[in-house]
Image (cartoon, rainbow, N blue to C red):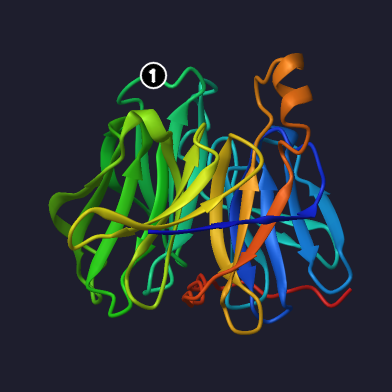
């Protein structure tokens, strides 16, 4: 199995860096710091990392067809115009549950936004994976989850992969491209607890899965047909949270990390915790799906 090392590209002490997403139109990386309420836009050419404070804990971000950013915050979703700073509220299914927040999420091939919730105390079974469509409908896709993570679709759109982190498993569902329905859940990989907690996930053009290991200091590439780990990326920090393919050829893996709850001694040992990393890999990723919406980006 080949092992390579990722390089630091932006030093920052993010509390919980997450939600990495490649913005191909603007050749930039979008990512979030969940507990610092920030959506960041990192420009690889200039090295700049612009932050936008959304005022609530932010789990993830996606791009809409109109150019807005849709995000999952503490109690639901909203839309943000990065040019004007204007926010538009979307559905808020957890408005009356302050003990719950949204975590990871992505858009499906149909252009709907899937995002899952979790309890702040990680209570088992407290979460739900939701689907949000352009008409403002909210659909419960998977109930009784604990920490929603991952979320990727196969190249042909026939499979949906999902991680509920505390199961230490990667789940596969049959996905219906016309309806968005999922069925026939099965386990395609089990992550050894000794190597870390499975967190965010990406997928490449060979339909292999790239899983960030929280506490494991690495990203592993999994063959879902066999469950075997066939490639790994090592990082100089332990808490790896998400990964995404980016760059002009989609062969650069961008990786986020966290510094949350680390002791003074741990931070001294791993001073780059919370930073952004990148590595060029001999594989290519898939562009993210955009969310269909009925909104327009402001020109003012």
Task: Compare residues 87 and 159 and report the one nearer the observer.
Answer: 159
Asked if residue 72 is positioned above or below residue 79 in the image, the reply reads above
Quarter that holds the C terminus = bottom right
In the displayed structure image, the side of residue 210 where residue 265 appears, left or right = right
- The residue located at (50%, 75%) in the rendering is 282
User: Which residue does the numbered mark 1 point to in the structure image?
Assistant: 123
Query: Could you tell me residue 157's position as x and y percent?
Result: 28, 75
Asked whether residue 71 appears in the rendered view, the answer is no
The quarter holding residue 217 reads: top right
Asked whether residue 65 appears in the rendered view, the answer is yes
The quarter holding residue 114 reads: bottom left
- The residue located at (76%, 38%) in the rendering is 272
In the displayed structure image, the side of residue 82 where residue 66 appears, left or right = left
Asked if residue 91 is positioned above or below residue 217 in the image, the reply reads below
Asked if residue 32 is positioned above or below residue 67 in the image, the reply reads above
SS under mark 1: loop
Total marks drawn? 1
- The residue located at (22%, 73%) in the rendering is 158
Query: Could you tell me residue 298's position as x and y percent?
Result: 79, 73
- The residue located at (28%, 32%) in the rendering is 167
The quarter holding residue 182 reads: bottom left
Query: Could you tell me residue 201's position as x and y percent?
Result: 44, 54
Quarter that holds the N terminus = bottom left
Query: Could you tell me residue 8's position as x and y percent?
Result: 75, 53
Characterize the local packing of mark 1: few (<14), some (14-19) or many (20 or more) Cα atoms within 10 angstroms. Answer: some
């Amino acid at each position: 199995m080949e092992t390579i090392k990722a390089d630091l590209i932006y030093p920052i002490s993010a509390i919980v860096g997450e939600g990495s997403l490649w913005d191909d139109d603007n050749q930039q990386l979008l990512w979030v710091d969940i507990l610092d309420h920030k959506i960041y836009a990192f420009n690889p050419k200039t090295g700049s990392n612009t932050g936008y404070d959304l005022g609530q804990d932010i789990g993830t971000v996606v791009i809409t067809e109109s150019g807005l950013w849709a995000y999952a915050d503490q109690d639901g979703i909203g839309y943000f115009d990065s040019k004007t700073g204007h926010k538009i509220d979307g559905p808020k299914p957890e408005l009356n549950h302050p003990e719950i927040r949204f975590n990871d999420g992505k858009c499906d091939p149909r252009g709907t936004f899937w995002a899952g919730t979790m309890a702040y105390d990680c209570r088992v079974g407290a979460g739900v994976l939701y689907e949000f469509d352009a008409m403002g409908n909210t659909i419960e896709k998977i109930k009784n989850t604990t920490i929603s993570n991952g979320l990727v679709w196969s190249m042909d759109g026939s499979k949906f992969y999902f991680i509920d982190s505390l199961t230490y498993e990667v789940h596969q569902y049959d996905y219906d491209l016309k309806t968005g329905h999922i069925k026939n859940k099965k386990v395609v990989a089990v992550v050894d607890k000794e190597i870390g907690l499975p967190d965010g996930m990406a997928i490449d053009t060979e339909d292999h899965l790239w899983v960030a290991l929280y506490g494991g200091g690495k990203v592993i590439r999994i063959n879902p047909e066999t469950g075997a780990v066939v490639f790994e990326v090592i990082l100089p920090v332990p808490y790896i949270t998400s990964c995404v393919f980016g760059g002009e050829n989609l062969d650069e893996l961008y990786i986020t990390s966290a510094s949350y709850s680390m002791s003074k001694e741990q931070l001294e040992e791993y001073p780059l915790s919370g930073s952004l990393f990148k590595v060029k890999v001999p594989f290519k990723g898939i562009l993210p799906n955009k969310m269909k919406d009925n909104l327009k980006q402001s020109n003012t």
